[in-house]
Image (spheres, grey):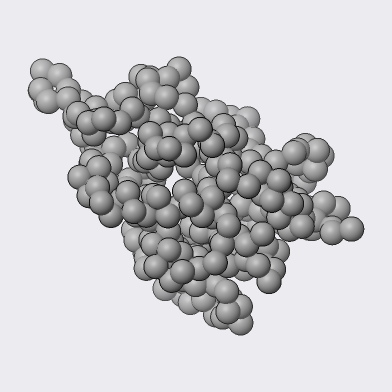
Amino acid sequence: MRIAYIISAYKYPGQLIRLIRRLNTDTTSFFVHVDKKTDDLIYRQMVSGLSQLPNVYFVKRHTCRWGDFGHVAATLEGIDEIVTTGTNCDYVILLTGQDYPIKPNRHIDTFFQEHAGELFLEHFSLPCDVWENSGLNRIEAWHVRLFNRHFSFPPGRRFLFRRKFPEGFKPFGGSSYWCLSRECIEYIHRFTRANPTFVHFFRHVDVPDEIFFHTIILNSPFARKAVNDNLRYIDWRDFNAGSPAVLCKNDFDKIAMSSKLFARKFDMTIDADVLDMIDEKVLVDV
């Protein structure tokens, strides 16, 4: 099983290097996107720390602010590199630099061999009960981010025009991170190149990385292969915080018992022990 990882990172060079070295095998490749806002020193540390691995590639950098199109652009950059370079892979997995595997590489390979062709991403149709205002405000209002500020222009008395979702498509949303087959990745690559108007619409969607890929896939022939599971262990213990909890050694038992393949998020500046525990007690090929 050949796996290509697209990894979105912006800090913690040591943690990124640790993640890639843990996932590295003879049948993996890595396409790393580093936020353009990231300090050049940190970027150079990432590049130099992984320079001895010939299967690690750093892609063109985009500015990624929370909730803007930069995250979609970064992922599309990784997809473009995989497809145009003819990288040999069966699956493409999207991670962040603060993710970590919670199953051995052999287990990950076996899982995708047994589920060949299936796509793994959390998904639900919009409108929904999960997101504020049914999620429709994300796509019907104009969203602009300038100078680290978010400006929203909803339809109403002051702004009369409701944005029309691309014709012929039903909107879907879900978690940003996924595991997709090579065939699906090639479909997304062809689709985005052939439909620039569709892509442009999402430049003014709020948190588009939680809608963009889901909408393409669930409106395509690949929809029947979509499994509603992103294969991540995530703890939303404080849902109102808007970000998953940082996993620590106190969470180890729950992590170890999980059937998921990956977990997020980790922060070595807060608790590196939990990663050591995962290495020593979970990620052991027997």
Please indicate, yes or no, whether residue 148 appears anywhere in the rendered image: no
Above or below residue 76? Residue 26 is below
- Viewer-side residue, 222 vs 178: 222
Relative side of 27 to 38, left or right? right
| Residue in the image at 23% along x and 34% along y | 166
Question: Residue 141's quadrant in the figure?
Answer: top left
Q: Where is residue 32 in the image (x, y as percent from the top left)?
A: 49, 65
Please indicate, yes or no, whether residue 258 appears anywhere in the rendered image: yes
Residue with the most extreme front position: 221
- Viewer-side residue, 41 vs 21: 21
Identify the image quadrant of the C terminus.
bottom right
Above or below residue 130? Residue 182 is below
Q: Position of residue 184 (x, y in %)?
A: 47, 48
Q: Where is residue 147 in the image (x, y as percent from the top left)?
A: 25, 50
Above or below residue 77? Residue 200 is above
| Residue in the image at 62% along x and 62% along y | 2
